[in-house]
Image (spheres, helix red, strand yellow):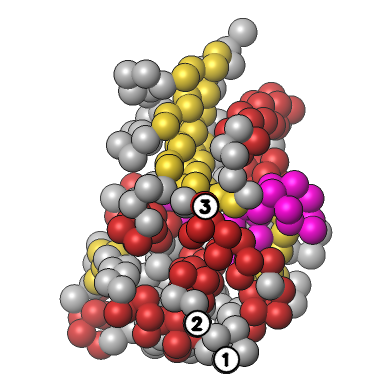
Amino acid sequence: MFRRFLAAALLLCASAGASAGIPTFCDRADKVTAADQDRVLRFAAAVKDELARSGSNLALVARAGLDLSRFGLLYSHAGIALKNNPGGPWAVRQLYYACDESRPRLFDQGMSGFVLGADAPTHGHVALLFPPEQDSALLEKAALDKPLALALLGTSYSANAYAFGTRYQNCNQWVAELIAFAWGRLDPADPARARAQAWLRAQGYAASPVRIPSHWLMFAGQFVPLVHVGDHPLDDIHALALHISVPTAIEDFVRKEAPRTRRVELCHDERHIVVHRGWEPLGPGCEPLPGDDVIALAP
């Protein structure tokens, strides 16, 4: 529990153990009741409905995983859902950490599994971004270019990797760097992560600092597997403010680069599913805003 608390505090992305078909956390035991599974599968069906009616071939997708409310964050893990994914319609192409191999991998995962990977099956949030047609086509081409997608996969994983460093990489960083190659029209024959990060910087990608609550937590994080601080600038470490790629940073960047991007956010609790279309975010309590669609879950 202590290690999981520290990992949550320093933004752990998805990982997968040898016996788990769903990306999860290396030290987490999955305990999902039949009622929980039914609820989450109904939620996944609602997400698939939005994907099907979007008219797009691609969606940037983010999922709420661990409780990051102490940092003012809801979403922790991002990927790219592709209508024409070889792994199946709307499977999510994403970086995950393979626990049994001790290395990062690319993984194509069905939307139901992606949603089931959330930390708490009693509630969940998913955000979908649908860029305009031209931007979507460029990103789809890059995401389906397997040599490029794999070339941008870092060799060493850190859940809290520095957004502008190449020593480590986290799941959201891979998505941001793929966006850079797609929208920056960078040469896929030279798939250097540093080139992607230079383009992101030039375009104003912020990776706004994530505030760490205490120096003790920053120090203790050095002893947690999959968490590192050695790649971060010393000034950031001393200021307890780490620049990390998180889904919110990607969302803000996409909105700035492609203002006509459409956003759909879905959430569920034990009572209902809410489908919200627009940029105003839903709160963590999954209460509908005016005009939202609400699907009852409770009997």
* Stretch in magenta: 75-96
The spot of residue 294 in percent (x, y) is 48, 17
Q: Which residue is mark 2?
A: 186
Circle 2 crowding by C-alpha within 10 Å: few under 14, some 14–19, many from 20:
some
The image's mark for residue 286 is none
Q: Which residue is mark 3?
A: 133
In primary-sequence order, the first of circles 1 and 3 is 3
118 displayed left or right of 293: right
* Quadrant housing the C terminus: top right
Residue at the (33%, 52%) spot, across then down: 259
CA distance separating discs 1 and 2: 8 Å
- Which of the pair 133/190 is nearer the observer? 133
Q: Which residue is mark 1?
A: 190
Q: Quadrant of residue 153?
A: bottom right
- Secondary element at tag 2: loop
Residue that sits furthest to the front in the current view: 134
